Amino acid sequence: MNIGTSLSALNAFTVQMDVTANNVANVNTNGFKSSGVTLENGQGQTVKASVIANNSSYPLASNNSNGNGAEELSNVDIVNEMTQLIPTLHAYDANLKMIEANIETRGTLINMVV
């Protein structure tokens, strides 16, 4: 078992959860542009997370306080964010269990040798 692969996956899924949390926190912030994460194979059986900005525009809302009468809303899709969070959490838990199993196996092996 390679613990490094699971650790890099944990880091990648942490980045993905952080981006999701930022998007959800700014769902009502006018003009906010959401971000997404792509997961890729890294060097030596690692997982790499790349953050990508979503620059798509969203509808304008009337706003008389800024002088021009319209302001762009946030482009965060809360339903999409929440549904993407579910497999991310399951993948994070699975990699955490792999690390725990690795540690337990090594402990058992050490106890057998001693």
Image: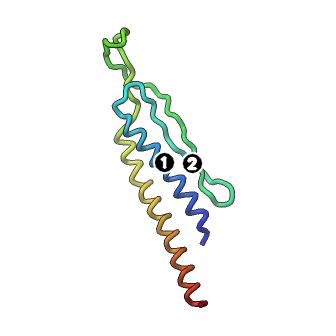
Question: Looking at the image, is 1 positioned above or below residue 42?
Answer: below
User: At 36% across and 19% down in the image, what residue appears?
Assistant: 60
User: At 57% across and 85% down in the image, what residue appears?
Assistant: 109
Determine which residue is flagged by label 2: 49
Instruction: Looking at the picture, tell me which residue is in the foreground, 32 or 77.
Output: 32
- State the CA–CA distance, disc 2 to disc 1: 7 Å
Q: Residues within 10 Å of mark 2 (few under 14, many from 20)?
A: many
Secondary structure type for disc 2:
strand
Question: Looking at the image, is 59 positioned above or below residue 106?
Answer: above
Disc 2 residue type? Ala
* Furthest residue toward top: 67
Disc 1 residue type? Gln
Q: Give me the disc on residue 16.
A: 1
* Furthest residue toward right: 43
Q: Earlier in the sequence, mark 2 or mark 1?
A: 1
Instruction: Looking at the picture, tell me which residue is in the foreground, 87 or 102.
Output: 102
Question: Looking at the image, is 92 positioned above or below residue 27?
Answer: below
Q: Please state if 42 lies on the left or on the right of 13 as rendered.
A: right
- The image quadrant where one finds the C terminus is bottom right
User: At 55% across and 87% down in the image, what residue appears?
Assistant: 111
Q: Are the residues flagged by discs 2 and 1 in contact, CB closer than 8 Å?
A: yes
Measuring from the top left, give residue 102's x and y in whole percent.
54, 74
User: At 48% across and 48% down in the image, what residue appears?
Assistant: 16
Secondary structure type for disc 1:
helix
Q: Give me the disc on residue 57.
A: none
Q: Please state if 71 lies on the left or on the right of 3 as rendered.
A: left
Measuring from the top left, give residue 110's x and y in whole percent.
58, 85
